[in-house]
Amino acid sequence: MKAVWLIHELTERGIGHFIGVPDSTLSDFCKCLERQYADCHEVPANEGAAVALAAGHYLAEQKPCLVYMQNSGIGNAVNPICSLIHEKVYRIPVLFFVGYRGEPGKKDEPQHVFQGEVTIPLLNQLGIPCEVIGSETTEEEMKAILDRAWDALADRKPYAVVIKKGTFEKETAGTDPGSKKTDSRFGADVPFTMKREDAIRVFAEYLKPEDAVISTTGKISRELYEQLDQQKGSHSQAFLTVGSMGHASMIALGFAESRPDKRVYCLDGDGAALMHLGAMAFIGEHHPGNLVHLVLNNRAHESVGGMATGAVHIDWKRVAESLGYLHAYSVKNETELRLILEECQELTGPVFIEAKVALGAREDLGRPKERAQENGDQFVNYHQSV
């Protein structure tokens, strides 16, 4: 199915706003939105915020919005689904497009397996009628699905379309959020040039055997896994978070509070940090002296397609300072990163470091060979003995 055809069909039926958090299953749909419908496309920090934003548009215009997300994002959206848009509350219609990760019977990453099993039952439990589409779905079938969806929306009720991998035909590559030449939203900003993998390589060089690392989901954990194996011969001192986007910093805080004898590093992404920004305020308030929070900022949701975040101009250093981090830095190259990593080993935290990195990763970037639970057990055993 061509994404441009479907988006045109949706706009013709009255959808004026497309709101969501990027998902790899929906990446071609999102690329088309960015290229041809950018004026009516918004990417908030998380899926719950997307539902609330859609509610605000509806209250102003009395027209339903489309909210898209990966099925893992349903959890973030449950509160406003139940307590804001539900027919027993404000009765606000929303059309949901949900990327179907972990589809039963299909191989996928471990964090998606259970989510895939409960996606349809969860939508049913939330009172949201849903239909599943895939590459075999024809335009005529899709029109019939939209007809049924519009009957529900006209009755001020939500409706969901669950979308399998490969449903949309491939779109051309999206713009690079790190380059002012390809995206006018970045104005006169200097493009970020340090490779994320190089920043992680430098970080690994400064990591001591007794240090603990909590890394966020996606390519950051995959790159850290390879760098630790290459440099240290083992990745056991790192907890490689799969799923739970936006929560790595709180995992790190919990570990740091319980193990004050260790220096604890959180390797985070800008999209993940934005998703639950309140975690940084909590860290600043609790001032763990042994925590270093390193955000690798490429201004994009790279692991799910590279779409720009909804806050590309955020000044992370000032945010961290305002939220109570005792020390905050921003670096743009390996030399600066080395200086700060050397300095921060003697500082009392919490310490915040923004590393400005370019969008992109090696095509042959591998994945962890162990199951998630195996990695977790290795991490526990390592830090009980070191």
Image (spheres, rainbow, N blue to C red):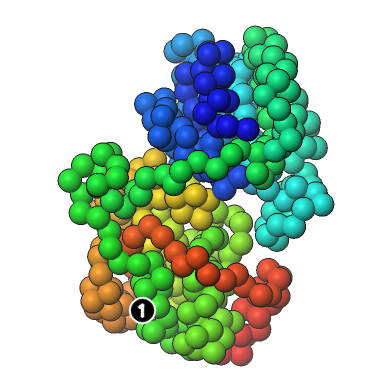
Task: From the top left corner, tell me how far across and down residue 324 is, in percent.
Answer: 32, 57
Task: From the top left corner, tell me how far across and down residue 172 is, in percent.
Answer: 46, 43
Q: Classify mark 1: helix, strand or loop.
A: helix
Residue position for label 1: 202
From the viewer's perspective, tell me whether residue 238 is left or right of residue 136.
left
On the question of residue 260 being in view, the answer is no
The amino acid beneath tag 1 is Val
- For this rendering, which residue is in front, 179 or 189? 179
Q: Residues within 10 Å of mark 1 (few under 14, many from 20)?
A: some
Corner quadrant of residue 243: bottom right
Task: From the top left corner, tell me how far across and down residue 93 is, in percent.
Answer: 61, 18
Q: Residue at x 57, y 48 (%)?
A: 24
- For this rendering, which residue is in front, 181 or 49? 181
Q: Quadrant of the C terminus?
A: bottom right
From the viewer's perspective, tell me whether residue 344 is left or right of residue 255.
left
Task: From the top left corner, tell me how far across and down residue 80 is, in percent.
Answer: 59, 30
Q: Residue at x 31, y 77 (%)?
A: 341
Height in image: 258 above or below 133?
below
- For this rendering, which residue is in front, 361 or 119? 361
Corner quadrant of residue 378: bottom right
